Amino acid sequence: MYTTTTDFGPRRTVRRPTTFDPAPLTELSGIKLNILFVLSQLDESRPSGREIQEAVRAQCPTDVKHGRFYRNLSDLVEDGYVDVRPIDGRTNGYRLTEETARRLHAHIRWQAQCLFGGAADAEGARESMLGSIVDRVRAVAADGGGSSVSSDDSTTDATTDGDAADAAPTPEWTVADVPTEKPLDDVVATAAGPFAVGAGGVGLLRRDGEWRLAVPDGPQARGYGLTCAAATDDGERVWFAGSSGALGYYDVTTGRKADYSAPREKTSTWEGIAVSGDAGAETLRIANGSGEVMAATTDGAGCPQWGDVVKPGSGSTIPAITAGDDGFVAIDTSGNVFAETGEGWEDIGIRNAQVNFADVYADADRLLVAGGGGTVFRYDRPCRNWTPLNVASVALRAVDVRDGRVAVAGANGTVVERTAAGWTPSPTATEATVRGIALGEVDVAVGAAGTVIER
């Protein structure tokens, strides 16, 4: 307890806020919280998406539209809050990850403290507390899915709306005009400009300051979504991969597309792709949701030759893989990092990470992993040691480095850069989740609903 005085009355006693570990889920919107609460109730049965949607509809005072529900459920899976597994070959089953379950309990305790103060510690207030919290979450979801109440250790300024507007930072990133409204999942720098990929198999190329539709419907011309992309070292060819085994490349110098989908009959969704070498002589690694990595080299004619399929870990999803100067590096959703050596894949960490990993970057100087809780992990190769850095308050989805500049991006339009002053937020003109970022002559980040921001 501590005491304080005001201009309007005597001193009063205030309960000092409790620090929760793990952190509450304050970065999530109301509808996403509602989905998590429903999943917690149905967790033993690993419910399907339809069962979750029906439960959400039954508990929300207003209807949650089909498209909106599945967009939010998909975001929760992609951000590592929810685990998904096939049930019968056609239907997926969903379950909270262990970390999400722990943070959900912490969220309940945090909201109880906000709502009830000291009464939340009393056993007699428990039922009232839980009922009020559930009602609050439902109300937030019904209010349009706005952000949940967030925690802030700083003192709130009593400014007017006009003062707040004047104090708001001017966005460094501006929203670009692009020829799609489909979600975009990744972006890479090429010799011709940034190249972005996403739902429906779209591939967008920024050339001469204008975004153009380079690939309208994927490598197979079937509209399968593209989840990841990587460019050759010379930037002339961008490889992309995605759902139903979709795999191919686009040559930015000639405009030629090539389809190599379902290599070795692999038709599951590719989650990550990495490329090393120049166009026509590249080496590839592609990874999927079953924790498998497939290798490929190119022959004298520039054609890919597919190698063996291996599992670096236990089979958890590999959401990202990258080509470093010392070889390929992959991450999985179980908190593992794998480095490929001449003898196979070696597990190099990260012990007790307790967050879900989303992206990885490697070069001669750096090995960085971005993930949940706004955490970046930095690897010290000589000491074989990982150091966690809390750089944001939201889940991070992407990391990139260019000419010594480091940037990470994630939920709520968040972009944070490593500068001489430390990790510094970079204002953007969007609140969409940023799923990919590429630094270059023009910096670009992409995300939901065809969002592209650039500077």
Image (tube, rainbow, N blue to C red):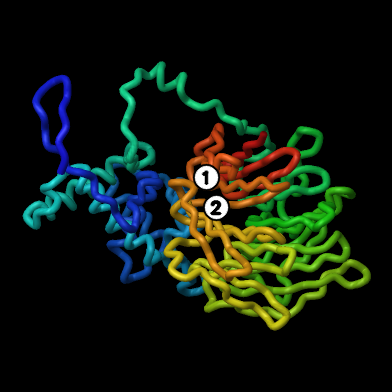
Instruction: Tell me: 258 left or right of 247.
Output: right
How many dots with numbers? 2
Identify the mark at residue 433; answer none if there is no mark. Answer: 1
Q: Secondary structure at mark 2?
A: strand
Mark 1–mark 2 Cα distance, whole angstroms, equals 8 Å
- What residue is rendered at 64% in x and 72% in y? 339
Most foreground residue, 388 or 212: 388
- What residue is rendered at 41% in x and 22% in y? 164
Residue most toward the bottom? 343
Residue 134, horizontal then vertical, whole percent? 23, 49
Q: Secondary structure at mark 1?
A: loop
Instruction: Tell me: 191 left or right of 83.
Output: right
- Can residue 46 be seen here? The reply is yes
Callout 1, which amino acid? Thr
Q: In terms of image quadrants, where is residue 53?
A: bottom left
Counting residues from the start of the chain, the first of labels 1 and 2 encountered is 2
Residue most toward the right? 300
Near mark 1 (Cα within 10 A), the count class, few <14, some 14-19 or many ≥20, is: many
Near mark 2 (Cα within 10 A), the count class, few <14, some 14-19 or many ≥20, is: many
Identify the mark at residue 397; answer none if there is no mark. Answer: 2
- What residue is rendered at 76% in x and 34% in y? 210
- What residue is rendered at 67% in x and 80% in y? 344
Q: Is residue 82 above or below residue 200?
A: below
Callout 2, which amino acid? Arg
Residue 389, horizontal then vertical, whole percent? 49, 54
Instruction: Tell me: 446 left or right of 144.
Output: right
Please state, as top left, top right, bottom left or bottom right, where the N terminus lies in the image.
Answer: top left
Residue 132, horizontal then vertical, whole percent? 18, 46
Most foreground residue, 261 or 102: 102
Most foreground residue, 172 or 195: 172
